Amino acid sequence: MTHTIRKATTDDAGKLAELAAVTFPLACPPTSSPEDIAAHVANTLSERHFREYLADPDVTLLVIDADGGLRGYSLLVNRPAGDPDVAPALKVLPSMELSKCYVHPEHHGLGAAAELMHASLQAAAEAGAAGVWLGVNSQNARAIRFYEKSGFHKVGSKSFRLGTTVEHDFVLERPV
């Protein structure tokens, strides 16, 4: 796969929303209802929301651009953790949140996710972060293995509302 990892632009917002609609459901537990997943995508991963993320000076959005098509993205948030379960668990400060990190399923196992992670950690370091944290669903074994392989370790847990259900996430952290 020939690709480039670059900062997203406002022109990418529609493609990001399309990619998010494909990738987000893969991170959900099998018990998640299609209605809850669709509601989350509509309420946080629409083209309008990606335009808002791109306009936020505290957000860094990276994309894997493969010949004009987006095959992955990450979203870093450079603000102190606001979640009362997360903030006290973090030890490597200042820290950035890796809020989203997804690769299209056709590109799983090809090294694209590792490259995106490397670029995301580099962007966090360049922004002055000493550490990066993320939340991952406690049932998403594949993602947990990937994050652990990427140097993250569990420091806590938090709840995440997905539509009408409350999911349980592990909080993982690593230095940059």
Image (cartoon, helix red, strand yellow):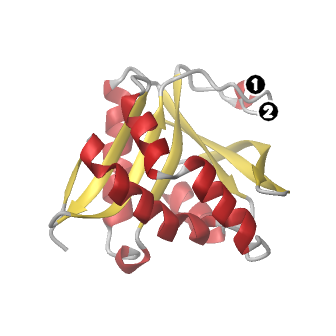
Measured along the vertical axis of the image, is residue 29 above or below residue 131?
below
Disc ID at residue 85: 2
Q: Give how far across and how far down residue 141 sits, in percent.
A: 65, 69
Disc ID at residue 126: none
Q: Please say whether residue 5 is visible from this viewpoint.
A: yes
Measured along the vertical axis of the image, is residue 157 above or below residue 145?
above
Q: Quadrant of the N terminus?
A: bottom left
The residue at which mark 1 appears reads as 88
Q: Quadrant of the C terminus?
A: top left
Of residues 174 and 10, the one nearer the viewer is 10
Q: Nearer the viewer, mark 2 or mark 1?
A: 2
Q: Give how far across and how far down residue 109 sits, in percent.
A: 39, 76
Labelled pair 2, 1 in contact (Cβ < 8 Å): yes
> In the image as oriented, which residue stretches furthest toward the bottom?
106
Locate residue 67 relative to residue 17 in the image: left or right. Answer: left
Q: CA distance from mark 2 to mark 1?
A: 7 Å
The residue under the point 29% across, 51% down is: 12
The residue under the point 29% across, 41% down is: 10
Locate residue 31 relative to residue 98 in the image: left or right. Answer: right
Q: Looking at the picture, which amino acid does disc 1 mark?
A: Pro
Figure label count: 2
Measured along the vertical axis of the image, is residue 18 above or below residue 121?
below
Q: Give how far across and how far down residue 96 sits, in percent.
A: 51, 30
Q: Give how far across and how far down residue 144 sits, in percent.
A: 61, 61
The residue under the point 64% across, 26% down is: 81
Q: Looking at the picture, which amino acid does disc 2 mark?
A: Asp
Q: Secondary structure at mark 2?
A: loop
